[in-house]
């Protein structure tokens, strides 16, 4: 009888240990660091059906990573596509590289960023992952529609920051608001 219980007890201990480790991994607390907003651009990038989000960072000044022209919308020329931008430009293309942070809380698990087109505008929104009917949080817009590359201008109260873990600044970029109101 004792030998039959031993494998069950071992399996339970391992299962509890794995679960405990997983919960601790989820509970990581990140901080944020302010950045020079002029060194970044959030871009609505055209794709087959609509636009997607890319953030470009000017890491060094040896060459410009993008140029801007016009207004409503501001058209972006992604210059980094024309040269080896290693060490010159940073680029975040998906949720591994960017997320939303409100009132000091990282919303990466609860909200997904997306770019949504309307007939007259392109919006950057955060949508609840848990409630598909919750209204989206509008983070930025292009102030006009284009089928090309467009600068996303952040709404008042929003800015870009970088993720910090145990005092070390990481490459992950936050769309940050100090407000907790959804």
Image (spheres, helix red, strand yellow):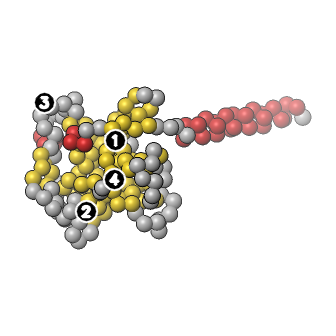
**What secondary structure is marked by label 3?**
loop
Tag 1 residue: 161
Tag 3 residue: 62
Question: Of the residues tagged 1 and 2, which is closer to the observer?
Answer: 1
Taking the spot 40% from the left edge, 38% from the top edge, the residue there is 32
Q: Is residue 21 left or right of residue 84?
A: right
Mark closest to the chain's N terminus, 3 or 1: 3
Towards the viewer: 148 or 174: 174
Tag 2 residue: 122
The alpha-carbon separation of the residues under discs 3 and 2 comes to 31 Å
Taking the spot 23% from the left edge, 66% from the top edge, the residue there is 121
Question: Of the residues tagged 4 and 3, which is closer to the observer?
Answer: 4
Tag 4 residue: 157
Mark closest to the chain's N terminus, 4 or 3: 3
In the rendered view, would you say 111 is above or below 98? below
In the rendered view, would you say 94 is above or below 24? below
* Residue 162 in which image quadrant: top left
The alpha-carbon separation of the residues under discs 4 and 1 comes to 13 Å
Q: Is residue 147 left or right of residue 175?
A: left
Q: In this view, does 121 lie to the left or right of 18?
A: left
């Amino acid at each position: 009888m004792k030998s039959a219980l031993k494998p069950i007890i071992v399996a339970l201990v391992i299962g509890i240990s794995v679960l405990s480790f997983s919960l601790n991994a989820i509970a990581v607390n990140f901080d944020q660091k302010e950045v020079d907003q002029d060194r970044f651009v959030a871009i609505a990038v055209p794709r087959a059906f609509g636009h997607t989000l890319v953030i470009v960072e000017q890491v060094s000044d040896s060459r410009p990573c993008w140029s801007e022209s016009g207004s409503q919308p501001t058209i972006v020329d992604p210059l980094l596509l024309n040269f080896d931008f290693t060490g010159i430009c940073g680029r975040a293309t998906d949720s591994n590289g960017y997320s939303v942070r409100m009132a000091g809380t990282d919303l990466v698990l609860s909200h997904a960023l997306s770019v949504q087109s309307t007939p007259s505008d392109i919006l950057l929104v955060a949508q609840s992952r848990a409630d598909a009917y919750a209204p989206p949080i509008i983070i930025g817009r292009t102030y006009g529609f284009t089928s090309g590359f467009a600068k996303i201008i952040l709404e008042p109260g929003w800015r870009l920051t970088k993720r910090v873990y145990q005092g070390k600044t990481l490459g992950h970029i936050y769309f940050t608001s100090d407000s907790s109101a959804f």
